[in-house]
Image (tube, rainbow, N blue to C red):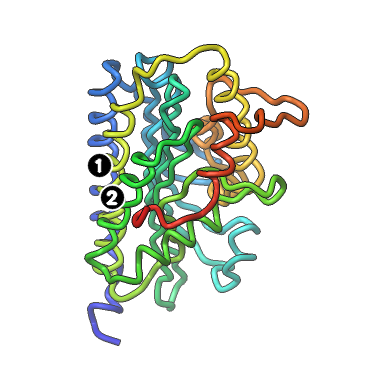
Amino acid sequence: MSASETAAPNIEAVKNYLLDLQDRICDGLSAIDGKAFSEDSWQRGPGERLAGGGRTRVLEFGNVIEKGGVNFSHVSGESLPASATAHRPELAGRSFQALGVSLVIHPSNPYAPTSHANVRFFVAEADGAEPVWWFGGGFDLTPYYGFEEDCVHWHQTAKAACEPFGDEIYPRFKSWCDDYFYLKHRDEQRGIGGLFFDDWQAGSFEQAFALMRSVGDGYLPAYEPILARRKDTPFGEREREFQLIRRGRYVEFNLVWDRGTLFGLQSGGRTESILMSLPAAVSWRYEHQPEPGSVESRLLSDFLTPKDWVSA
C-alpha cells in the first residue's frame, strides 16, 4: 500500500468543506424561498456522553419550504454505541470522531418533492493502531406526485457526480440507495432513490474525500431546478391530504430504519438536531389506498419502483 493510502486523514480539510457546503446549500435554498434559515449553534456540555458541537439551521413556514433543516455537526466520544460496534466489531474500545452535513427539505406544495442529502466522515482511533476511517452519504428524492422529467434530471445529475470516479460507481450507489431507502414493513420504496454509500474507503483518503465532495456538490444542481419548477403549481385539499399521508411513510422510515437516526440517539446526540428531519405536519389514515387509476395511485405503480431513470 502506498504512503498516500496510509497517510492520516485530514479531518480539518473535511470540516472546512462541510461548513462551506452547509453555507452554499442554505444560500441556494434561501434564494428560492425568499426566507433565510435561522441558525442554532450548539456545543456539548461537560459530563455529556459526546463532545463537540455543530450548527443547526432550520427554515420553517417559508414561502416555499414548510420545514427544512441543514445541519453540520462534529462530535467525538470515547466509545461507540452498541449499534455501531455490532456493525463493525473492530471499532470496540476505540475513540471516534464523526463529522457531517445532513439535510431534509419538505416543501409546502405537494407537487414539490421532499429531498434528503447527507455527506459524512467517520474516524476511530486507538493507541498504537492505524486509524479506521470511512466516508458516506448520498442524496435521494421523495415525490408525492411523480413527474418523469424530474426523475430523469435527478438521476442524470447523480450519475454526473459519480462519473469522474468510474463507470461502475453510479449503478452501484443507485442500487445501494434503492436497497437502503426501503420500508420493509410496508414493502415500499421511500422515493425514487438517487445515491447512497457508506463505509467508503476505496483508494487513498484524498480519492475517497474527492468522491464525497462530488456527491455533496451535486445536491443543489439536482434539486434546485425541480423545486423551482414545482413550487407554484396550483393544488387543493386532495393533494395536501395525500402529501400528509405520504409524509407519514417518510417519518416511519426515519424512526424505524434509518441508521443515522439510531446512531445519533443511541450515542447521546442532540435530539432536536437529529429529529429536525421530521415534517411539520403529517397524517396517518387506517388502511389508506389511493383510488385505482388516479394520479395518486400512479405514484406507487409508476414511480416508487426502482428503475433506470437515466435511460427513461
The residue positioned 42% from the left and 43% from the top of the image is 52
Closest to the observer: 231 or 42? 231
The residue positioned 72% from the left and 47% from the top of the image is 185
Please tell me which of labels 2 and 1 falls first in the chain: 2
* Residue at the right extreme, as displayed: 286
Give the residue at mark 2: 157
Q: Residues within 10 Å of mark 1 (few under 14, many from 20)?
A: some
Closest to the observer: 280 or 114? 114
Residue 133 visible in the shown view: yes
Indicate the quadrant where residue 133 lies: bottom left
User: Percent x, y for residue 136?
Assistant: 41, 58
Vertical placement of 38 versus 136: above or below? above
User: Percent x, y for residue 80?
Assistant: 57, 58
Which secondary structure, mark 1? helix
Give the residue at mark 1: 221
Confirm or deny contact between disc 2 and disc 1 (CB under 8 A).
yes
The quadrant of the image that shows the N terminus is bottom left
Which secondary structure, mark 2? helix
Q: Residues within 10 Å of mark 2 (few under 14, many from 20)?
A: some
* Total residue callouts: 2
Whether residue 61 sits left or right of residue 246 in the image: it is left
Indicate the quadrant where residue 165 lies: bottom left
Vertical placement of 106 versus 48: above or below? above
Whether residue 229 sits left or right of residue 92 in the image: it is left
**Label 2 is placed on what type of residue?**
Thr
User: Percent x, y for residue 141?
Assistant: 44, 41
Closest to the observer: 51 or 172? 172
Vertical placement of 161 versus 303: above or below? below
The residue positioned 29% from the left and 16% from the top of the image is 35
